[in-house]
Image (cartoon, helix red, strand yellow):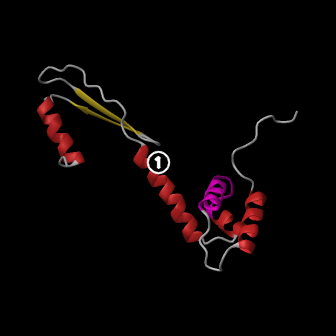
Amino acid sequence: MIPTTRSRRPRLETVQRRLDRWRQTRPHAHAPLPPRLWAAAVALVPEHGLYGTARALHLDYGTLKRRIDAIDRDERDRMTASFVELPPATDRDTCVIEVEGARTTVRLRLNGLALTDLAELTRLVVGPAA
């Protein structure tokens, strides 16, 4: 059976050809690599690894790594809480704070904590409001 959908991830050979063509037609020897070629190289890293991709495409390992790290930072920056619900609480209820991350969940169970104490704890953890 022939697959009917194409993978969005470029193939290594395709990116190699695109890079070779760009290197032959670039305006000068130190011209920066276009963003689309960097994006194609970055897309290959999950399949071929950082070192394998850099070596196969003749790219600087450190520069490719910085691009991967920048993407990871951007994804972390986009992960923000979209909704927080606090149930009505009496003065000294048990409070459970649960934070879900990409790889783990942190759960804090605080007994006998007033909402004012919770606000102070939040300021200590997050820092003062800007």
Residue at 21% of width from left, 41% of height from top?
122
Number of dots carrying numbers: 1
Residue 47 falls inside the magenta stretch: yes
What residue does disc 1 label? Answer: 75
Residue at 61% of width from left, 61% of height from top?
38
When the figure is inspected, residue 23 is found, relative to residue 81, above or below; the finding is: below
Amino acid carrying mark 1 in the image: Glu
Q: Residue 54 appears in which quarter of the rendering? A: bottom right
Q: Nearer the viewer, residue 10 or 23?
A: 23
Q: Residues within 10 Å of mark 1 (few under 14, many from 20)?
A: few
In the rendering, at what x and y percent does residue 25 appear? 73, 72
When the figure is inspected, residue 7 is found, relative to residue 109, above or below; the finding is: below
In the rendering, at what x and y percent does residue 46 appear? 63, 53
Main secondary structure of the magenta stretch: helix
Answer with left or right where residue 106 lies relative to residue 58: left
Specify the quadrant that holds the N terminus.
Answer: top right
Q: Nearer the viewer, residue 108 or 60?
A: 60
Answer with left or right where residue 80 lies relative to residue 123: right
In the rendering, at what x and y percent does residue 50 appear? 62, 62
Give the magenta range. 35-50
Residue at 66% of width from left, 75% of height from top?
27
Q: Residue furthest front?
A: 27
Residue at 59% of width from left, 71% of height from top?
32
Q: Residue 48 appears in which quarter of the rendering? A: bottom right
When the figure is inspected, residue 112 is found, relative to residue 121, above or below; the finding is: above
Callout 1 secondary element: helix
Residue 74 falls inside the magenta stretch: no
Q: Residue furthest bottom?
A: 29
In the rendering, at what x and y percent does residue 129 appear? 18, 46
